[in-house]
Image (cartoon, rainbow, N blue to C red):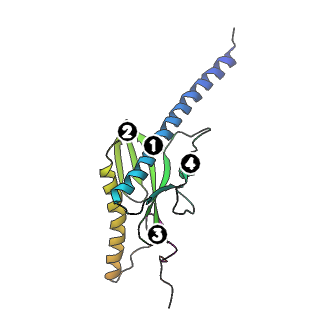
Amino acid sequence: MSDRSDTRAHQLAAAVTRYRERAAENYVRVRTLAEALRDGFCAYLHSNDPPCVHLAPPLGPFEGKDYGDRAFSAPPVGFQTLGPIAFGLIVRVSSQNDWLRLVLTCAKEGQDFIVEIEDGPSHTFTLPLQPGDYTAFFELVFEHVKGWFERETERYDAGDYGSRAIGFDVIAGSEAPLTPKPP
């Protein structure tokens, strides 16, 4: 015969088990999508020098390399929280080995899976996610990045530096600094 405290402990453990199952499901969904985006976006860019896209942490310093498990705001094992997960998608943007990081946050809303670009647009995938064609998302990312560089160049040409807000981080390759050195 069990007493009330044993029953409550069992109920709590069962609730935590369901929570952990959903958190693990969420992590696997985000991780699978992130890896598909990494691989697919490089192919979409038609780069002659892959790899041209990596996964990196959403915050802090980064280099043009893949960070594996450390690229995600949630851990791959242990107690995972159930909520949106962020990761960095870093893209080589020049032949001089310049990289930029887009921070993507993924969240489930009903049967939709929303991927939001920090300071940029978002894209909605329908659940369950199916392996396949992500061209619409790739076009969104490409136009977001290319558009920023074009708008800032046009502003400069018009005599306006605009703002310094970029919406993503850029690291310059060793061959060409991102900002010119004074003469």
Q: Secondary structure at mark 3?
A: loop
* Mark sitting earlier along the chain (1/4): 1
Q: Nearer the viewer, residue 19 or 28?
A: 28
Q: Secondary structure at mark 2?
A: loop
Q: Residue furthest bottom?
A: 183
Q: Is 98 contained in the magenta span?
A: no
Cβ–Cβ under 8 Å for marks 2 and 4: no
Residue 109: horizontal and vertical position, in percent? 40, 40
The crowd level at tag 1 (other Cα within 10 Å; few <14, some 14-19, many 20+) is: some
Which residue carries the number 4 mark? 69
Cβ–Cβ under 8 Å for marks 1 and 4: no
Q: Is residue 2 left or right of residue 84?
A: right
Residue 2: horizontal and vertical position, in percent? 69, 12
Q: Is 171 contained in the magenta span?
A: yes
Cα separation between marks 1 and 4: 12 Å
Residue at the (31%, 46%) spot, across then down: 133
Residue at the (49%, 35%) spot, across then down: 25
Amino acid beneath label 3:
Asp
User: Quadrant of residue 74 in the image?
Assistant: top right
Residue 92: horizontal and vertical position, in percent? 43, 64
Amino acid beneath label 1:
Thr
Magenta-highlighted stretch: main secondary structure?
A: loop
Which residue carries the number 2 mark? 129
- In the rendered structure, find residue 32 and report the number of the disc placed on it: 1
Q: Is residue 106 left or right of residue 155?
A: right
* Mark sitting earlier along the chain (2/4): 4
Highlighted range, magenta: 167-176
Q: Is residue 9 left or right of residue 145?
A: right
* Mark sitting earlier along the chain (2/3): 3
